[in-house]
Image (tube, coloured by chain):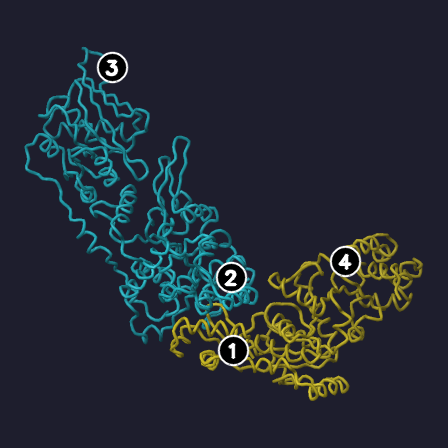
Amino acid sequence: MNSQTDILDWLAFSFITGVGSRTAAMLLDKFGSPTDCFNANVHTLETLGIKREIIDQLKSIEPRLRAEAELKQLENLSGTILTLDDDDYPPLLKETYDPPIVLFASGDIQRALAQPALAVVGSRHCSTYGRNVAEMLGRELAMRGVTIVSGLARGIDSAAHQGALDGKGLTLAVMGTGLDAVYPKENKKLVEKIRENGALLTEFPIGTPPLPQNFPFRNRIISGISLGVLIVEGAERSGSLITARMAYEQDREVFAVPGNITSAKSFGPNYLIKDGAKLVQSWQDVVEEFPFEVKTQILSAERNEKIPTQLAIDEISLSENEKKVLALLKPDESLHIDKLTELTKLNFGELNDALFNLEMKERIKQLPGKHFARKL
Amino acid sequence: MLFKTLSAAVFGIDAFVVDVEIDLTPKAGDSLVPTFTMVGLPDAAVRESRERIRAAINNCGFFFPIHRVTVNLAPADIKKEGSSFDLPIAIGILGANGDLKCEALEDTLIVGELSLDGRLRPVKGGLPIAVATRQKGLKRLLIPEENALEAAVVNGLDVYAVSDLQSVVAILNGDTDQSPMIIDTQSLLADSNYYSEDFREVRGQANAKRALEVATCGGHNILLIGPPGSGKTMLAKRVPSILPPLQFEEAIECTKIHSVAGFTEKRGIVSTRPFRAPHHTISDAGLIGGGAVPRPGEVSLAHNGVLFLDELPEFERNVLEVMRQPLEDGRVTISRASMSLTFPARFMLAAAMNPCPCGYFNDPTRECKCSPMQIQRYVSKISGPLLDRIDIHIDVPAVKFAELSNDEPGESSKAIRERVVQTRGIQRERFHGEKIFCNAQMSPRLIRKYCQIDARSKSMLENALTRLGLSARAYDRILKVSRTLADIEGKDAIEPYHVSEAIQYRSLDRNYWA
């Protein structure tokens, strides 16, 4: 087990600027632990070719002071820290080429990683279709015991997290900032719910702002920590395609949800499918590709228990008017309320009442401009 | 020699009577004492009248006296401003000089600005002046032609429309058969309430029209949200046409305000509900009134009508701040070191905005180019006290071309107005004895009293608040709108479907923007 000093030293070690993953790996390999690196002989370090600036930091008190401050702040946030030699360090992530030396977590990270994990990523400017699919798949997989991993971004990421929460499952958000920040700001409430039903994870120390260069680093964790990556929507030059490539490099499964060939937002997934990614239409398509034990466990549980939530949704009775309105709504595109008025011929009171109830029963959702779409 | 005439000065939207005293004293030889002195705190325009009066008197065939002239405008400690004293001073000089047949003019009030040739120009505040004249117990008012129409509305006063100095003298001397102006106030208002814009011209937009009708019925302020070209301005412009017809007292109030601002020349009384649409670059003084001697601002000019703030997020923050008092109290108090004036300002507020800076957020046909940060900043510009006073948010979608040509013409304003009048009637009865007249003005106490909802509605409302991310402030607002919806149907009890429709009018509270 790690003593407090060990953790401090690990953290201090991670704060040394100029030490990339290669150098870190080499040092740890040579000396054993960060504590040993700090105590190493200067001459030996020089012979190894370590630069002067790095040796200075190893010999200075700075990194440790900074680490102390960091640990204190972390305590205030009720966060935890995982180091590379921790038993609890995510095993899949440890196997990757470039794992973070130190991870900061909030929430129950152990519980979240005890289940098989699937990453769901996609465009920030997603369509109604994309959002619906991400929510549905997030929900369907989460309620069958799969942890949904994503990046807390607007669009597909948020939809996937929300879907997992709707399915009463677990979700893991990997952040491109320190644990104290919430980026984007509007996900404040979502972050709280994720903390209670999963965990937040980041390799960046407290106080790190959402710099653009942080996100590729964060993406390698998203794919590294999961069994596979599902891309729901992504334009030709989107970040989600980069995450897909990282997944290939890390030897993870790549899944993609196809879309209309006329939709620029579905260019990415369609392209990946052409390139060999697994085409996904339902949760079964994903689970099929999981390792044997995982797959068998999920599928047998499915056979044995009826998943109550699904049936409950269907069983909630709808009034005549609600059925009429629901029949007209599609998950792919939204319909404006004036059109609904025209098509249903209901008066304003009846129509608004039906729409409200359908929304409360989670069958439809309302979009800006008084547009409505069915939920998947 | 002393002569006195009566005139009036405008203060706020009322007028008060001013005594104009003229004294002529013979000059002593080559005395260097100035020959024309004006006292009583005249401002620059009043002091300049000396030249106008001299020229006018000479050009009309009279003789400007060589005496020393002293003019006193009493009461002496109130500032006099404007050019409306030209005529009474000129008449006073003529009177003191013996050119008038009468010895005194005790029951006549005179106002007017003089041109150099003796012709009269209109003044501001014709109606308030007439009201003040009547209140003082005077019988006659001589006022320039352009102002006579509005002044003649006052009962029990003989209003003479005059066009030049000679005709004034003729009337005062009794040498003319000009009679007072007679106005049929009933007919004035009867063919009033004619609006050139009608809802019939709006095609489609069923939901937006419904929301506007609901808003107008209950007096609720509205916010129209939609892309450019969706017809927000078009819809807002038609709101006055569905408001209940302007009553006589309301018309008088409006006329006073507009008259003081100088807008009523030749038009007589204001007979349609005002629609004011200030540009978003307006200053706070322009909006609520101000100036060294305060003039009414746009909020007062919109009294009894509609104030339309297009591009709401573009208005200066501090300008929107000053809207608080009028929206709260229905009037505006402007204080200066020397005085404090109150102008009425009760209006229906209509505001419009795009859903995002480029305008095309969630538009099915065009791509929105705004970053979420920009949208956030844009929408949050109007948070706070102003949004708190807006009960109904209306989404106005982009109107596709096909719809424009296919849809039949909409319902006429007349038809909609009938329903509004009926619903307002229910509210008037309900609030008889209270100080308010429509649902939107209900205080929390009145909301508890008149907006009871059953358990099902209550739980539905609470559910909506959490699920849809609505704020707690929305609760009372939704209840008020529900009350209006029930009133429209003539129902006493508020049904759950009234509440669910009311909830639909809170778009901006939802969390898909922020």
The residue shown at (16%, 41%) is B145
The residue shown at (24%, 17%) is B34
Q: Give the residue pinned by disc 3.
A: B33
Cα–Cα gap, marks 1 and 2:
21 Å
Within-10-Å neighbours for mark 3: few <14, some 14–19, many 20+: few
Q: Give the residue pinned by disc 2.
A: B509
Amino acid carrying label 4: it is Leu
In contact (CB < 8 Å): disc 1 and disc 4:
no
Eye-nearest disc, 4 or 3:
4
* A262 shown above or below B26: below
For chain B, what colour was chosen?
A: cyan
**Residue B318, position in %: x, y?**
47, 46
Eye-nearest disc, 1 or 4:
1
Q: Chain of mark 2?
A: B
For chain A, what colour was chosen?
A: yellow
Amino acid carrying label 3: it is Val
Q: Give the residue pinned by disc 1.
A: A374
The residue shown at (80%, 65%) is A102
Cα–Cα gap, marks 1 and 4:
42 Å
**Residue B297, position in %: x, y?**
36, 44
Q: Are marks 3 and 1 on the same chain?
A: no
Instruction: Left or right? Give the position of A334 relative to B203.
Output: right
